[in-house]
Image (spheres, rainbow, N blue to C red):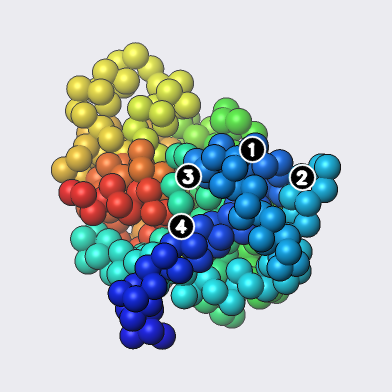
Amino acid sequence: MKSLIEIQKKLLPDLLEIMQKRYQILRSIRFMQPVGRRSLAQSLGFTERVLRSEVEFLKAQDLIEIKTSGMTILEDGMQLLEKIESMMREISGINVMEGKVKDLLGVDDVVIVPGNSDEFPWVKEELGRATALCMKNRISGKNIIAVTGGSTMASVAKMLTPDISTSDTLFVPARGGIGEDVRNQANTICATMAEQTGTKHRVLYVPDQVSKEVYQSFSKEPMIQEVLTLIRSATIVLHGIGDAKTMAERRKTSEEDMKKILSGHAVGESFGYYFNEAGEVVHKVATIGLQLEDLEHVPNVIAVAGGASKAKAIRAYMKSAPSSTVLITDEGAAKELLKG
């Protein structure tokens, strides 16, 4: 396959460009359906004239359907996408990019999905799909899966299906989250993941950040101790990586701590730790739940973050991440990471 693609690149470069364009259109319709031509053209950066001729071709091939409500992908189109996905990854150079990012960050593995989630919100669904597949390949026997909050994790939850986990799987929140948008709280996401997979979950009804005195008080509660024990026994941890300033604002950080984060030039955040570009911790929030040092004892750590804007945050966090980490990201972040 590789040699054939190399020959095509030399002799029929236009053919590969057309294939990539039509593949991109099909993928976009799958995630945005039903979608109108104007919305799709704007999303892809195509003119309506160019898009019109392409979608007419796809319709003629019985790959999509065009109605007044918008375009939708047909079963043949779905099957075609699945069949050519690995080939398109090779054509676009994503496979090579994965190897380069893996070497750069020194992690166990890297999975890159096409697109840039900063520009196309539906790329988050691709991140979710890739994460679901990664989980499926690592689940066996009894599993405790600890999950953090955030919009990316919420997208992952929607993409899970019953075939991903065993019946002996338990989802637990990696840390407290009361006070955040309820849709993006770890408790809510765990509940959704359990529902999507037909498994069980536990909740941790405590704030995301607390004072030292409250932390000690909460930690003595029997029910909270029980959940914390489960969290620290996790076989898989799913977590996002946030932009430092965005996360600080979401947490309604005090003026004093915000000054510390900004003066320390923090660019990334994960598990309540704020990192500068050198990977140094410039601020730590007292959170109830999984701590960064706990990750060293977890067999499978899956970090999910996409978008070119997240590249600095990813690089900063990965300097402290355990070597068992698998990074699920997108082309936007990967290209920015490789720029150095």
Whole-percent x, y for residue 253 in the image: 40, 21
Alpha carbon separation for disc pair 4 and 2: 24 Å
- State yes or no: discs 3 and 2 in contact (Cβ < 8 Å): no
Instruction: Name the one closer to the observer, 215 or 282.
Output: 282
Whole-percent x, y for residue 140 in the image: 56, 79
Mark 4 lies on residue:
114
Alpha carbon separation for disc pair 3 and 2: 23 Å
Q: Amino acid at mark 1?
A: Ser
Left or right placement of residue 34 versus residue 288 in this view: right
Which of the 4 quarters of the picture holds residue 230?
bottom right
| Comes first in the chain, label 1 or label 2 | 1
Q: Amino acid at mark 4?
A: Pro
Q: Residue at x 73, y 71 (%)?
A: 76
Label 4: how many Cα within 10 Å (few below 14, some 14–19, many 20+): some
| Comes first in the chain, label 3 or label 2 | 2
Mark 2 lies on residue:
70
Mark 3 lies on residue:
117
Looking at the rendered image, the disc whose residue lies closer to the viewer, 3 or 1, is: 1
Alpha carbon separation for disc pair 1 and 4: 19 Å
| Comes first in the chain, label 4 or label 2 | 2
- Let me know if residue 285 appears in the view: yes
Q: Residue at x 28, y 35 (%)?
A: 267
Looking at the rendered image, the disc whose residue lies closer to the viewer, 1 or 4, is: 1
- State yes or no: discs 3 and 1 in contact (Cβ < 8 Å): no
Q: Amino acid at mark 3?
A: Ser
Instruction: Name the one closer to the observer, 138 or 225.
Output: 138
| Comes first in the chain, label 3 or label 1 | 1
Left or right placement of residue 47 versus residue 63 in this view: left
